[in-house]
Image (spheres, rainbow, N blue to C red):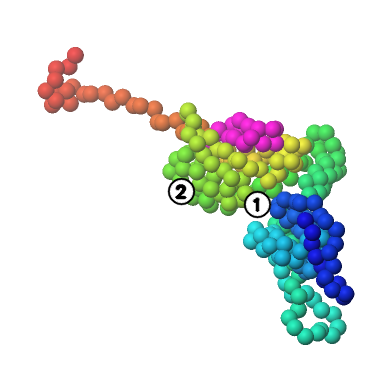
Amino acid sequence: MKYVRETTEGRETVETAAPQSTASSRDRVARSILDHGPSSAADLAERLCLTQAAVRRHLDALTAAGLVTSREQKVYGHRGRGRPARVFLLTDSGRSTFYQAYDQLAADALGFLAEAAGGGEKGREALAAFARARLARDAERYAGSLGECPDTEAKAQALAGALTADGYAATVRSAPLGEQLCQHHCPVAHIAEQFPQFCEAETELFSQLLGTHVQRLATIAHGDGVCTTFVPRAAPPPHQETSTTDDETAASGRNPA
């Protein structure tokens, strides 16, 4: 594919580029914005050796996906006539599609916390306390979502809805003797792989909210596809047999055996 750019001398044909997929070119556009900061379509076309029309198509797609936004280019000093050029920059969602070291930063901080607490058992206790404190911020909100749910199944469904709102993609399915609360996504899975205290604290919270002992069957942190928690149904009240008096038997017209 050949592309053409404008020069002071006129139109100039530059080197031939190997064909690339639309997705690959779009990724290059986003990466160029990440590397160079807010960029105009002309800047991107020049850097990537693409036509401005092609760049604008990619920018439109990235904008529609919520990965890129635009604003007027800041002009320092005297501004010429005409509308100022628009520059494109990544949104928070756009930045999150590229590798960032947040997980490693969190893991380093938690490791430092455990060591600062004395390491060993004291370190594990400090991590467990931190995990519980972190979830305590959500406990009251989750409890409000459960409201006046009449039974275990309704409570599990309400909890799944609250978890989904926080990014856990939770569902409930019936199982023998109870319900299975399934979380199809875990925002802290990489941290929980190294620090199981987060899974343990979450299980404790579920037990408190649902008012029954629950059992963790699988976790994404341990390599399973879904975090699965078994929630037993409340046992029905024991059946009480009523005794029949002689007077009641007589009134019924039956002879006592």
Give the amino acid at mark 1. Arg
Q: Is residue 212 above or below residue 21?
A: above
User: Is residue 146 visible in the rendered structure shown here?
Assistant: yes
Viewer-nearest residue: 193 or 146: 193
Q: In terms of image quadrants, where is residue 189?
A: top right
Measured as percent of width and height from the top left, residue 92 is found at: 72, 59
Q: Residue 151: image x %, image y %?
A: 45, 40
- 256 left or right of 178? left
Q: Which mark is residue 148?
A: 2
Image: 92 above or below 180? below
The residue under label 1 is: 137
Query: Foreground: 102 or 208?
Result: 102
Q: Nearer the viewer, residue 252 or 109?
A: 109
Q: CA gap, disc 1 to disc 2?
A: 21 Å
Image quarter of residue 69: bottom right
SS label for mark 1: helix
Coordinates of residue 127 in the picture (x, y in percent) = 76, 41
Residue range corresponding to the magenta coloring: 211-230
Image coordinates of residue 41 in percent, x first then y, are 76, 67
The N terminus is located in which quarter?
Answer: bottom right
Q: Is residue 38 visible in this depiction of the protein?
A: no
Q: Name the element at disc 2.
A: loop
